[in-house]
Amino acid sequence: MGELRLSYPACVIAGKTRLTVDDIAILREHVFVPGITASQDAVILLAINGSCSEKCPEWRHYFIDALTEFIVHTRYPQGAMDEWNADWLIAMISTRGVVNSRIELDLLFHIIDIAAHIPDSLSIFALEQIRMAMAEDTGAWASLRGTRKNGLQKADVLLITRVMSAIARSRGSQLTARERRMLDEIGILTGVSASRVEAA
C-alpha cells in the first residue's frame, strides 16, 4: 500500500492526523458513493485507516461495516469466505502473519462472526493471533487480553469460541487436521498449551 496513489479528497483525509465524523461523511458522499465496490476501494480505506493515528468513535463502526459488506457480501461467494478472499484479507491486515492493529483485529473477528462459511486458512490465522499473544506477547491481541500470562485466560477462550462457532457453521463438528493441531498447540483441546506441556 506504500505506492498507492490517492485521489482528492481521499488524499487530504489520509494526510490528517485525526479522522472525524465529517471525514466519514466526505468518504460516503464523494469517495465511496455506492459503498466499497472494488478491491482498490478497500485498499484506499485501509490506507486511510493506517495513515491516521487518531480516530473518532464513529470510525470503528464505519470502517468495519464498510469492509465487511464488501468482503463478505459483495465479493463472490456472497455471504461466505473462500480461500482467495481469506488470503486477500490476511495480506491486507497483517504484517508477516501478525495483526498489530486493534481495529483490523476487530474486522477479522467480525467477518468470522458473520460469514456463513470460512476456510481453515482463516480460522487458523485467527487462532494464531491468540497463540502468538499467549506465547510470544505479540500482536494486537497481546495488548487487549489484559494479562501477559502465557496460559489460557477467559478472554482467550471467549475469542476462541467465536472461531469455533464459525467452524461449526462451516463444517459442523469436523475440524481439519490443521485446525486440530492449532487448537492443541493453544491448549484448548488439552487444557494446557503444548509449550507448557514440554516445560513440565
Image (tube, rainbow, N blue to C red):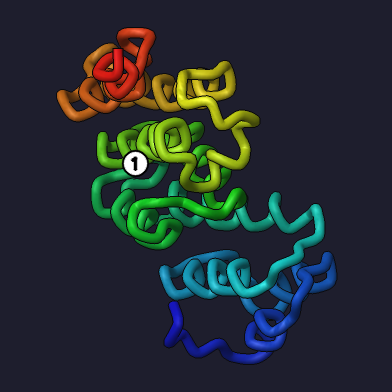
**The image quarter in which residue 171 lies:** top left
Q: Is mark 1 on a helix, strand or loop?
A: helix
Residue 144, can we see it? yes
Asked whether, in this view, residue 5 is left or right of residue 182, the answer is: right
So how many labels did they put on this image? 1
- Point out residue 121 in the picture as x, y percentages from the top left corner: 26, 41
Residue drawn 50% across the image and 38% down it: 109
On-image quarter of the C terminus = top left
Residue drawn 64% across the image and 78% down it: 31
Determine crowd level at label 1: few under 14, some 14-19, many 20+ residues with C-alpha closer than 10 A: many
Asked whether, in this view, residue 120 is left or right of residue 133, the answer is: left
Residue 76, can we see it? no
Asked whether, in this view, residue 108 is left or right of residue 22, the answer is: left
On-image quarter of the N terminus = bottom left
Type of amino acid under label 1: Phe
Check the image and name the residue furthest to the left.
177
- Point out residue 72 in the picture as x, y percentages from the top left corner: 44, 47
Asked whether, in this view, residue 94 is left or right of residue 15, the answer is: left
- Point out residue 149 in the picture as x, y percentages from the top left corner: 53, 25
Q: In this view, does 67 lie above or below 115?
A: below
- Point out residue 102 in the picture as x, y percentages from the top left corner: 60, 49
Residue drawn 73% across the image and 58% down it: 59
Find disc 1 in the rendering and name its residue: 125
Check the image and name the residue furthest to the top.
190
Q: Is residue 142 above or below residue 55?
A: above
